[in-house]
Amino acid sequence: MGGYAVVDIEATGRSPWRHRVVEVAVVLLDGDLRTEESFSTLVDPVGPVGPTHVHRISQDDVIGAPRFREVAPRLLELLAGRVMVGHHVSCDRAFLEREFARIGVPLPEIPLLCTMRLARSRLPEATGHGLAACVAAAGLGRYPAHTAMGDARAAADLLRHYVRADAAGGAEWREPLREAARIPWPRLGRARSLGPEGAVPLLRREAVPGPRAPGAIRIPTVATARDGE
């Protein structure tokens, strides 16, 4: 426990109150920004998948994907004691908070680090503050945009870029880590729909690298509630 949880959410729309999570990814980094674990899955939103032209997830893609309640216990474990990081992280946090609220779990107030907001002072050469523009300005190369795992890994790389370029020696980053470690976290038992073995049928996708990857491939995977990617 401890470190950073870099998250990305793909959703059926822009409103956490009216729309649902359709894909989630988490990349865990330790206090020295080394990758510890990663997790991703498509999520059945129990309704229309929304803007396929943006996230490139079709209705057929989520057939067989778990519902949010089925992956919620694992997500709580991944986030516990961590600073939440993301590109426009308040949006990702809002969707997760609302999804957990729907199953009666209050998501604690945790420290946030936004790689988009940090770019305003740390990437003045960027042509914009979207993820693709920031990644390009930082010289981090191509990535599978608008896939949850692709965006989460890109945000993790941006965080590393910011910290390594910090002339102050990283003092700004240490206090959120200490604060996150002090916050108590809820626990959640496995969903009843999973049966006695508690197996979660994760459904991951991969995409060709690039800011506007042309397509995706579904990769059915079965993992226990404690397994990562």
Image (cartoon, rainbow, N blue to C red):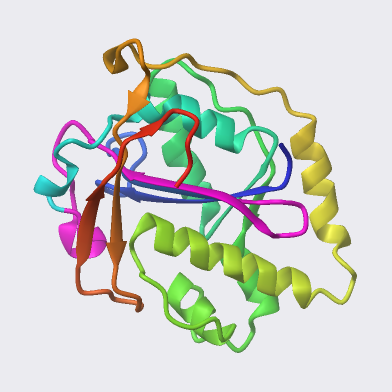
Q: Is residue 18 positioned above or below 215 on the image?
A: above
Residue located 78% across and 45% down the image:
177
Q: Is residue 151 positioned above or below 164 on the image?
A: above
Q: Position of residue 31 (x, y in %)?
A: 77, 52
Q: Is residue 22 magenta?
A: no
Q: Position of residue 183 (x, y in %)?
A: 74, 28
Residue located 41% across and 74% down the image:
143
Q: Nearer the viewer, residue 43 or 84?
A: 43
Q: Is residue 121 positioned above or below 139 on the image?
A: above
Q: Position of residue 72 (x, y in %)?
A: 43, 27
- Decide if residue 18 is on the left or right side of residue 75: left
Please tell me in which quadrant of the rendered image residue 223 appears: top left
Q: Which contiguous range is marked in magenta?
A: 28-57
Asked if one can make out residue 85 in the rendered structure from this viewpoint, the answer is yes
Quadrant, the N terminus: top right
- Decide if residue 37 is on the left or right side of residue 69: right
Q: Position of residue 140 (x, y in %)?
A: 54, 81
Please tell me in which quadrant of the rendered image residue 224 appears: top left
Please tell me in which quadrant of the rendered image residue 179 appears: top right
Number of numbered labels in the structure image = 0
Asked if one can make out residue 59 in the rendered structure from this viewpoint, the answer is no
Q: Nearer the viewer, residue 134 or 117?
A: 134
Residue located 29% across and 76% down the image:
212
Q: Is residue 36 magenta?
A: yes
